Image (cartoon, rainbow, N blue to C red):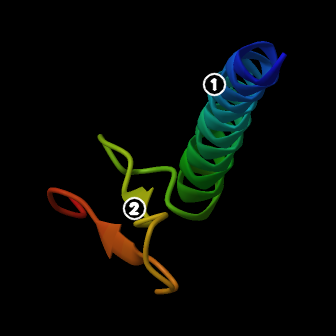
Amino acid sequence: MFSLLLAMTIILFVVLSIWLGNMRDENNSKQLRQSQNNDHQNFPYLAKYVFFYQRMHLSDSGNWVGDSLS
């Protein structure tokens, strides 16, 4: 009985971890698209987008990175 409960707990933990990872990836994808759209609206002459990069494992507010503004 204990081994069944332990196995179910491990399976539930793995499924929950995968689901939370997928949610994080979807949110990052939406944030990237929104950032690219904002860049294109504010700077329509840019040949490339200026990407917004945020390290999700730290409590920083993110950094703007990119090649150049030309």
Give the amino acid type for the residue marked by disc 2 in the picture. Tyr
Give the residue at the far bottom of this rendering. 60
In contact (CB < 8 Å): disc 1 and disc 2: no
Q: Closer to the observer: label 1 or label 2? A: 1
Give the residue at the far front of this rendering. 1
Instruction: Give above or below for 12 relative to 38.
Output: above
Q: Secondary structure at mark 2?
A: strand
Q: Which residue is mark 1?
A: 14
Q: Which comes sooner in the sequence, label 1 or label 2?
A: 1
Q: Is residue 2 left or right of residue 69?
A: right
Instruction: Give above or below for 52 relative to 16.
Output: below
Q: Residue at x 75, y 31 (%)?
A: 16
Give the amino acid type for the residue marked by disc 1 in the picture. Val
At label 2, counting other C-alpha atoms closer than 10 Å, the crowd grade (few under 14, some 14-19, many 20 or more) is some
On residue 1, the disc is none
Which quadrant is home to the N terminus?
Answer: top right
Q: Is residue 67 left or right of residue 52?
A: left
